[in-house]
Amino acid sequence: MVKKSHARVENTNENYADCLCYTERCPTYNRSGLTAGLFCARGRSEKTLEKRGCVCPSCPIWAECKLNGVFFCVYGAAQ
């Protein structure tokens, strides 16, 4: 079960394990040299990223927490 709090995603090991950011499926992540993930909880990357596609809508966390946004790595944590 994905943990959430007040429409925000909690920064937990369980959520990180379910996160799709750092998988081979995310073109923005894979082409940017990123090493973190779970941007919907942790906030945007410190790197300037070129958006090359987003897998957030196919992530179980996105669905469970009923998130609306995409490119959390660029725009910041879900609100």
Image (cartoon, rainbow, N blue to C red):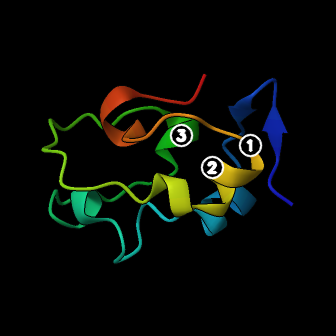
- Foreground label between 1 and 3: 1
Give the position of the C terminus as an image quadrant.
top right
Residue under the point 16% across and 56% down: 32
Disc 1 marks which amino acid?
Cys
Residue under the point 12% across and 44% down: 50
Q: CA distance from mark 3 to mark 2?
A: 8 Å
Residue 43, placed above or below residue 51: above
Q: Which mark is residue 65?
A: 1
Apparent side of residue 79 relative to residue 46 in the rendered image (left or right): right
Percent across and percent down for residue 60 are 67, 62
Q: CA distance from mark 2 to mark 1?
A: 6 Å
Q: Which residue is mark 2?
A: 62
Q: Which mark is residue 33?
A: none
Apparent side of residue 26 relative to residue 4 in the rendered image (left or right): left
- Which residue is nearer to you in this view: 59 or 49? 59
Disc 2 marks which amino acid?
Trp
Residue at disc 3, secondary structure: helix
Q: Which residue is mark 3?
A: 40
Query: Which numbered disc flags the more N-terminal residue, 3 or 2?
Result: 3
Is mark 3 in CB contact (under 8 Å) with mark 2?
yes
Apparent side of residue 27 relative to residue 18 in the rendered image (left or right): left
Q: Residue furthest right?
A: 1
Question: Based on the displayed image, in which of its 4 quarters is residue 61 positioned?
Answer: bottom right
Percent across and percent down for residue 4 are 80, 39
- Foreground label between 3 and 2: 2
Is mark 1 in CB contact (under 8 Å) with mark 3?
yes
